[in-house]
Amino acid sequence: MTRWPDILVDARALQDPEYSRRGIGRLTSNLVASARTAAPELEAARFLALVDPAMPPLSPAHRALFDAERCAASPAALHRPAWFIEPSPMTHDPLFVARLLGDSEIFSAAVVYDFIPFDAPERYLTRTETRLAYHTALAWLRRYRLFLPISASTAARLATLLRIPERDIATAGAPLDPLFAASPSSASRRHVLVAGGADPRKNVECPLRAHATSTALNAACVPIVVSGIYPPSEVERLAALHEAEGGEPSLLSFAGGIDDAGLARLYRESLAVVVASHAEGFSLPVIEAMASAAPVFASAIPVHSELVADSSLLFPPGDPLALARLLERVLREPSFAASVVAAQEAVWPRFRAERVAERFWQAIAARAAPPRLATVGIARGSRPRVALLTPLPPDRTGVADYSAASVQELGRRVELHLFTATPSPAPVPGATSICPLSALPFLSHRFDRIVGVIGNSEFHLQIFNLLLRYGGAAIAHDARMLGFYRVLLGMERARAVASAELGRSVAPEEIDAWLANEAELPTLFLGELAAACTPLIFHSPRTARLAAERYHIPAHWLPFSLQRPWQTAALRPAARAAARARLGLSGEEIVLASFGYVHESKCPEECIWALEMLRGWGIAARLVFVGAVQGDGLPLRTVAERLALADRVQFLDAYTSEAAYRDWLLAADLAIQLRRFGFGSISGALSDCIAVALPTIANAELAEAMEAPSFVRTIPDPVSPVLLANAAADLIAEGAHHSRPLAASEEYAATHNFARYAEGLCNLLGLETEWRQAA
Amino acid sequence: MAASGVNEVLIDLSELVTNPLRTGIQRVERELLRHWPGPASLVPCCFDSEAGTLVRLSDDTLARLLNAGGEAEPPANGAAAPIAPDLAERIIFNPELFYDRSRAAFYRRLCGAGASRVSWLVHDFLPWLQPAFFSRRGACDRMDYLLALRAVPRVAFVSGETRADYRRAIMRDEQSGGPVFPLGGDGPGLPKQSFDAARRDFVVLGTIEPRKNVAVILEAFRSLWAKGISAPLVMLGRVVAEAERERAMLAALADCPLFTFAEHPQEATVRAALCRARALVTASAAEGFGLTPFEALAAGIPVITPADLPSIRLLPADGQLRLPGVSAPEIAAAVRLLLDDATAARLFAEAARLHVPTWADFARDISAWLQEA
């Protein structure tokens, strides 16, 4: 079965106002627009525009050229086979697309224009940073698989300079705008047109001198027109030069910023067109003149020799007299002009836009390798290398603990390198290396996959920014990112994202209102991640479903793993009794515990009210919040006091140590784990409760997100203290608080462990692992 | 002074005084005031948070409360006179649901001090037991009412379902709670209606909120209209903020010739609509009682209704098309049945034969219960 390629085209030239309507922008749009006609085998290919979110958006016309947009160069976002086309490799930041060049399954091709800055550094690379940027781009240019120079001269220079084998080079040329190929007008040809431009290499001084010194041209009052845009000072300088050489000032004019139609008219009305440039990668004015049936005389440089076969029509760029002789002959001998035009008639059609596109796409189609069948690991004969970007312990975040816990199993399957912003990270068994977080993994070709771990806290800010810039796989621990945007990225960014996701302007007051009441949140603030990250992975099926619906992406669900392993023996009654003793708990009171950071969003006040009801029903219970408390916890303490429960509600004021946390998991009779807001949030604390077979009450959305076993009793959303109290009373009436349903917990652990998690993650990353396990 | 209170029942109307709306509970209060049979006099009061106790309302205030009901009206001016501080001995009746913490604390104190004649009428426990129909926030703000209720010695209910909830989920005591007093169906004051082929309208009454499943009713009628079936729908009721879907649907139907909607109807408008009704349609997913179908049936008007409404379960099935579930196809099918004149005439005749409790019945029973305290 034919598999049509995904063709990702760097569209930054189309975003850049400097280039979008001319030069590389025009070439890019022509190549994409003509692709399906030029190469019928691309009929069903998917053309994707790679856009930089930091640049202006594509115009509607340019956007219409593509089937979709991508905002990060993530290889995983492409169906295989995949091609990457870079129409302007030396223009914009090469690091933005670097990851695509390191992927052996992506065929990459770059248009190459010239090496003029390299050859004239004294003019173009005068500043250190410019020089550095140019050479960086040059180094990355070597990594493409196919090069499509716009001229044979550039091809030759490419082969010499970068030592590119001839087989990897296909000269395509540059396209002629159809406007210039219109039928020549019958208007009289009266002026000499000089292809100019503010760059000194255009060498307009030579034709100006030729014109000024030519008695015949002056006598015949033949005007000379210079195209291109010049600053006033330069116009003044050139006019002075022309006059100083004896030219009649009234015969010299500058076309200035005329449009293409005006320029085409100038060509058609030219007695002759002069292109005197010292250096060019291609020379569009030469073929534009030819298409306009104007005799063209060009400087004797390699690229002009490709286009003007008759060397007698070339002049040394420093020889105005040689040029003057050609111009005078055109004036004097109409038959000469006609013969030049006739000879040049056969040249320019090769550069019709469709011909260039044909050569371009057919060269790529012919050389693009079929998709490789082996996985990256097999192909290289070693385990795949994965870079995991994540906070690590001792950062006090549950995500850091979870990532660290996942490493051992993941490290069995892949060569795992951790990149973290955590200062002095603790050793993590299973990791091949732990490195400071940077863009390195995105730019290095050492890594087959890059995975960023994202959460709604400051520990993830740098990872978030890197993923947005370079793309990659993302594991999103949180179901919504409102707080992250508002607090860490600022109001304006939050507004911009909300406005984009909702398709309307969002006011600052709305953002703050949502922050105060997330129940009203109309979107998830995951749009930027969804656009940049492939695959985008969630631990909750509900969040994955919501993200897929809202962002029209294939969001993936990877079931959350139990994080803290327990031996069955450690859960026996004697061990539990010992834990209670260590915590100073009496035997009579029923201990209800809520684990994890105590925050308003986890319904702690509802828990206190439920305790009040339980005690009102004669159930001797106490409530313990096992986790740090938001702020000073005063509002909760006040509620407890008002309900005369101050001595029955316990807050652990310090960060709970691992040992104390585990003791509470053993000692508790029932747990309560709640979320006020849905969106499919998950809970590491609930996972811990399940691991120790602790009968727990959770709200329905949370239990669903965790695929909780039956000993997790669910109450409806939103949380009602009455239903919570009744659920607890029912469990107590059933005697559930005396039992630990270990079999159900073990059954859950069999499907929610890090081995399964690692396996699932590898599958989502397209890293097959069965061969290694068999080995 | 103690002797002067012997033949008085203090009724706490704080919500009615401070926020007079056309809610179902305030309807109950007004009907009780209108139909109070004695012999003890009913003394309207409200809670004064500054004084921390009940105060007696003036006759003027009472008269205005009886006639109030439009949401645009300003709150009635409250208190007039203090009540002697021997409240522990008095018959105090609260028929309201409220979320005022200080008022709840007042009742807790009173009951905690041994006031055995404090009596409450409870309408439902939907905010606590069916939270999906209510805001995610505020669950704890609603708890003070329950905290006080659990201390109240005498509690009556408007339906057996509400009492069952009280016993099962609030007290966890199957013996707790007092009697059930069904509400009256004769509030609109309509004479018994009879079938007339010219009666074509299907009427929906009450607040428009997600719990009431109004969107399902609208869907049902849209499907009928799309098939060219002429079934006029008249919808009268306030749209609550949470009813975003319903509001959008109502806006989309603004130009539909078969649809009439009024958000703030006067009593006369409601009565006129019922007088033209072929049937009343209700689809509520949860009710403490379900007054509107009760009232329609009392006036001899057939109803399309969920089978499990507490009010409907009090009555034989006559005059009703009871729906086992609530879905647009089921409602549409019921409407089509009622468009048949013979079927409609039969249901009208059945409804006319029903004996529906009246507000006088309700006031008499409540009065007796309170005075036996």
Image: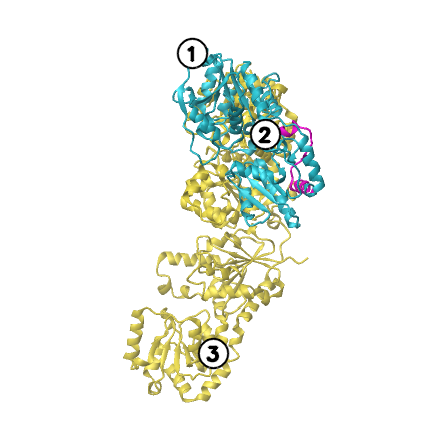
Q: Which residues are magenta?
A: B310-336
Residue on which disc 3 sits: A292
| Residue B276 figure quarter | top right
Residue shown at 38% from the left, 58% from the top: A130
The residue under label 2 is which amino acid type? Asp
| Residue A595 against residue A256 in the figure, above or below | above
Q: Which chain does the yellow colour mark? A: A
Residue on which disc 1 sits: B1
Subunit of label 3: A
**Quarter that holds the N terminus of chain A:** bottom right
SS at circle 2: loop
Subunit of label 1: B
Q: How many marks?
A: 3
The residue under label 1 is which amino acid type? Met
Give me the C-alpha separation between circle 2 and circle 1.
Answer: 38 Å
For label 2, the crowd category at 10 Å Cα-Cα, with few meaning under 14, some 14 to 19 and many 20 or more, is many
- Is residue A298 visible to the viewer in this orientation of the structure? no
Relative horizontal placement of residue A460, taking residue A537 as reference (left or right)? left
Subunit of label 2: B
| Residue A556 against residue B175 in the figure, above or below | below
Are the residues under badges 1 and 3 in a single subunit?
no
| Residue A199 against residue B47 in the figure, above or below | below
Q: Earlier in the sequence, mark 2 or mark 1?
A: 1
